Image: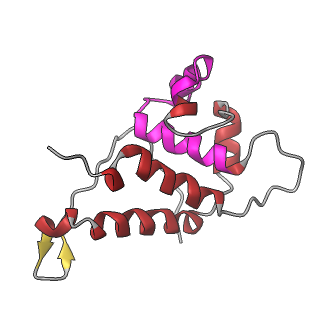
Amino acid sequence: MKINERLSASSLYEIVRSEFGAIKDQRTKQVAISLQDILMSGFALFSLKDPSLLAFDARRAEPENLHSVYGIEQVACDTYLRTVLDEVPPAQLRPVYKRLFERVKQEKILDAYLFMGQYYLVSPDGTGYFASKQNIV
């Protein structure tokens, strides 16, 4: 089976990292960790499916995979991660999803899920661990 390099984890994670790098950091103080690293830490938390921020925080003791797989230079601790991510408007994350969707669409991965010629029937994955009660506009 031939592996499609454009759909490899490293290729897709690079898209995520690139898009996160384009998000303007609204923090006004001197920052210890870049917004890109904080966003990538949040992405890693969800993609690794750790059951809690505390469990993810334990990975900071051995961050080699977070550095090599996700390209995170400085991994944020759970408190810092929570504090900064709460301030990022969800609308700023939409370009990430659009680029990933476009890549998958270009590679015709979704063709099998096309319904009535224009709709995609896809069941998104949900871990059940994380939820927000805040309304998103």
Judged left or right of residue 7, residue 85 is right
State whether residue 133 appears in this view.
Answer: no
Quadrant of res 42: top right
Q: Is residue 42 above or below residue 65?
A: below
Residue 68 horizontal/vertical position (percent): 53, 32
The residue at the point 60 percent across, 57 percent down is 20
Q: Is residue 91 visible?
A: yes
Question: Residue 66: where, in percent of width, then height?
Answer: 54, 31
Residue at image location 51% in from the left, 68% down from the top: 95
Quarter of the image where the N terminus is located: top left
Residue positioned most to the top: 61
Q: Magenta segment range?
A: 36-65
Residue drawn at 65 percent across, 40 percent down: 81
At horizontal 56% and vertical 19% (from top left) the residue drawn is: 58
Side (left or right) of 2 relative to 86? left
From the viewer's perspective, tell me whether residue 11 is left or right of residue 19: left
Residue placed most toward the observer, 123 or 101: 101
Q: How is the image coloured?
A: secondary structure
**Residue 132, horizontal then vertical, whole percent:** 49, 51
> Is 98 covered by the magenta stretch?
no
Q: Which quadrant of the structure image shows residue 79?
A: top right
Residue 39 lies in magenta, yes or no? yes
Predominant SS along the magenta part: helix
On the image, the x and y values in percent for residue 14 come to 50, 51
Q: How many marks?
A: 0
